[in-house]
Image: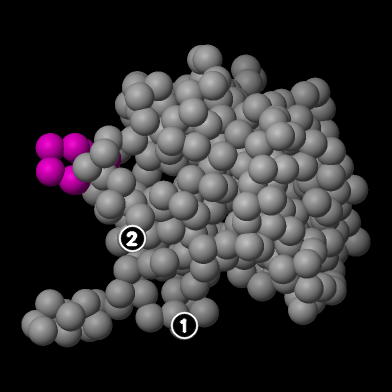
């Protein structure tokens, strides 16, 4: 099967700049109390998504905006996990990828990339500094459906100014660099998805255990959405943004279509080489329905 569009660029200067500016730059330090908490754990963040939304999140990018696809899923999985954990918020809609793409490339990256693509560190700064938008209508702007054409247009011009104050209401507070399987395992076990940017490619057929075989090189952004550290083959479940049918084969833990498990050793390599992958936490969600109604009556 032909590969889908990608679009990640590694910029070590941008990563170092983000780490220097962030108050929680590195997961190993900022989340030190969680160290080892994922040992022998099984945590499937996609079950949280199903419980809150009633379905899987399966994106299908049409241009090289994979960084925004991975980061939008990061916001969505995090929001659902927070609600399941008991935070007083409500689910409204999926995160709009086009806004993250525009903010990362233009407002943060300064338009330095010609053609498609973005940098993970730029997206991390975009969602913490500028925030996120949902797939809703904003006046004459209808973001309810993904548009690759809009992504490219905004990716060259930036996010419309009138939407920036709205986006700032919904930031992700913490994006911390993850550089090993064990760190990603501990993050996911505690409800924090990991947006992964790497050069590792995979075969489009899962093996008998639901794992993807490493193959080739992809300059791509995806997201780790589950961990099974208790299996004889410990690993993470990786969700792509190429729709439900780019990969086939056996599944485990009722994983979503379009995903595959990745062995711990491969995960470690993806996170360690050209590090630009982040655990996300602290999404500022929408007030619960009863709290919102009370606010409106004041």
Q: Which residue is located at x 49 percent, y 72 percent?
A: 82
Answer above or below: position of 88 versus 233: below
Q: Which residue is located at x 72 percent, y 43 percent?
A: 16
Looking at the rendering, which quadrant does residue 10 occupy?
top right
In the rendered structure, the answer to whether residue 172 lies left or right of residue 145 reads right
Q: Nearer the viewer, mark 1 or mark 2?
A: 2
- Nearest the viewer among 177 and 82 is 177
State the CA–CA distance, disc 1 to disc 2: 21 Å
Which class describes the residues within 10 Å of circle 2: few (<14), some (14-19), or many (20+)? some
Labels 1 and 2: the sequence-earlier one: 1
- Nearest the viewer among 293 and 241 is 293
* Residue highlighted by disc 1: 86
**Where residue 158 sits: x, y (%)?**
36, 30
Which image quarter holds the C terminus? bottom left
Looking at the rendering, which quadrant does residue 103 occupy?
top left
- Nearest the viewer among 298 and 194 is 298
**Where residue 230 sits: x, y (%)?**
84, 69
The mark tally for this picture is 2
In the rendered structure, the answer to whether residue 249 lies left or right of residue 37 reads left
**Where residue 170 sits: x, y (%)?**
37, 59
Please identify the residue farthest to the left as the structure is shown: 297
* Residue highlighted by disc 2: 169
**Where residue 53 sits: x, y (%)?**
39, 62
Instruction: Kindly state the secondary structure of the residue where label 1 is placed.
Output: loop
Residue 146 in sight in this render: no
Task: Write the start and end of the magenta stretch as one range.
Answer: 137-143
Magenta stretch contains residue 141: yes
Q: Which residue is located at x 69 percent, y 31 percent?
A: 11
């Amino acid at each position: 099967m032909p590969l889908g569009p990608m679009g990640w660029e590694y910029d070590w200067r941008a990563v170092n700049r983000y780490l220097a500016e962030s108050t929680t730059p590195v997961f190993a330090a900022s989340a030190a109390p969680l160290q080892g908490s994922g040992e022998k754990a099984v945590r499937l963040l996609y079950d949280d998504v199903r419980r809150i939304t009633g379905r899987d999140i399966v994106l299908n990018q049409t241009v090289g905006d994979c960084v925004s696809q991975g980061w939008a899923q990061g916001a969505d999985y995090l929001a659902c996990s927070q609600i399941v954990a008991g935070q007083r918020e409500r689910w409204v809609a999926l995160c709009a990828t086009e806004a993250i793409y525009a903010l990362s490339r233009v407002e943060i990256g300064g338009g330095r990339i010609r053609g498609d693509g973005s940098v993970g560190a730029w997206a991390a700064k975009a969602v913490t500094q500028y925030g996120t938008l949902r797939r809703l209508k904003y006046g004459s702007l209808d973001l309810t459906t993904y548009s690759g054409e809009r992504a490219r247009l905004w990716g060259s011009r930036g996010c419309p100014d009138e939407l920036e104050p709205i986006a700032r209401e919904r930031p992700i507070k913490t994006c911390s660099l993850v550089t090993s399987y064990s760190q990603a395992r501990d993050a996911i076990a505690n409800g924090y998805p990991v947006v992964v940017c790497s050069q590792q490619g995979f075969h489009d057929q899962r093996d008998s255990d639901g794992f993807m075989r490493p193959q080739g090189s992809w300059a791509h952004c995806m997201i780790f959405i589950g961990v099974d550290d208790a299996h004889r083959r410990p690993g993470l479940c990786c969700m792509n943004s190429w729709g439900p049918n780019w990969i086939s084969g056996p599944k485990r833990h009722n994983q979503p279509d379009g995903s595959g498990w990745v062995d711990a050793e491969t995960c470690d390599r993806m996170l360690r080489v050209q590090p630009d992958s982040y655990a996300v936490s602290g999404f500022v969600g929408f007030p619960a329905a009863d709290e919102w109604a009370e606010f409106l009556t004041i």
